[in-house]
Amino acid sequence: MSRDGEPQVSAASGTGPETEPEPPPGAPGDPDGEALHAGVRDALTGLAARLDREHERAAHREAVIDRLHEENQRLRRGELQAMLEPVRAALYRLHDQARRESGRLAAPDLTEPPDPRGTALLLAAVADDVADALARLGVERFTVEPGAPYDAARHRPVAVTPVDDPMRDGTVTAVESDGFEQSGKVLRKAAVRVGRLGTEHDERETKAEAGPNGTERAVKAGSNRRNGAGNGESPKPDTQKTDG
């Protein structure tokens, strides 16, 4: 206290009744704080705008992907329909031929019996139409000539025929059906009958449908015997003999 009774101000403190305290940084009255707040608001506003644009671009990409997928599916369906067109055309022709032949044979004024040769030609034409339709799909028909050596990769034996000529042992004696292949890959083997040398068999054909493993062994045995494979002994056939 001073002599007059007034409060004494310390010079070291630097404060007095006339001195106001400085506002803290960021306070409403601080110019720097207001600038900082404005900068943060602008940054958040820009970030929100960028997020909105990213969402819009993502939605646009999703829409483009969905449209491309739908177009791809439509193109694939169109390609599939184009591939099946020759098959449908062949089936149309087969349907018409079968209907015409059925109507001709069922006609009440039919006096002459059906011509076997005409029927055979009709069936051959039907088979050619089917083979042509398959060829348009890339599936080629291959035939087997009787007398050709048996080939397990392309032939499917359905019967074993006893033969007396050693040169016919292990060869194709008859063809039951043609085979089909695509780009060198066999899709269906040709069904054939295979000759086998042996005097113990009678004149009836030995069916090979009892088991595929036995059939393969029987055919290979005949081939080895014809080619002189092994130690000179003729392997005994293991295909079961059935009637028919």
Image (cartoon, helix red, strand yellow):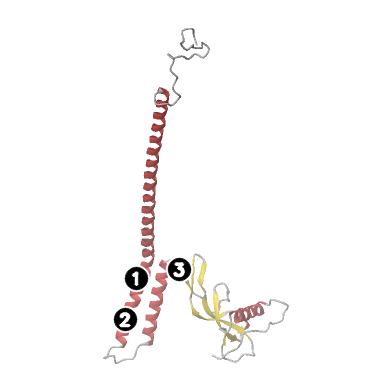
82 or 149: which is nearer to us? 82
Q: x, y (%) of residue 209?
A: 56, 83
Q: Which mark is residue 148?
A: none
Q: Nearer the viewer, residue 81 or 24?
A: 24
Q: Closer to the N terminus: mark 2 or mark 1?
A: 1
Crowding at dot 2, Cα within 10 Å, few <14 / some 14-19 / many 20+, comes out as few
From the viewer's perspective, is 182 left or right of 46? right
What is the number of the mark on residue 99? Answer: 2
Per the model, the C-alpha gap separating discs 3 and 1 is 16 Å
Dividing the image into 4 quarters, which one contains the C terminus?
A: bottom right
How far apart in space, not on screen, are marks 2 and 1 (Cα)? 15 Å
Q: Amino acid at mark 1?
A: Ala
**Number of other residues with Cα within 10 Å of mark 3, as a class: few under 14, some 14 to 19, many 20 or more:** some
Residue corresponding to mark 1: 89
Amino acid at circle 3: Val
Task: Give me the residue at 45% from left, 68% from top.
Answer: 139
Q: Which residue is mark 3?
A: 139
Q: Nearer the viewer, residue 30 or 64?
A: 30
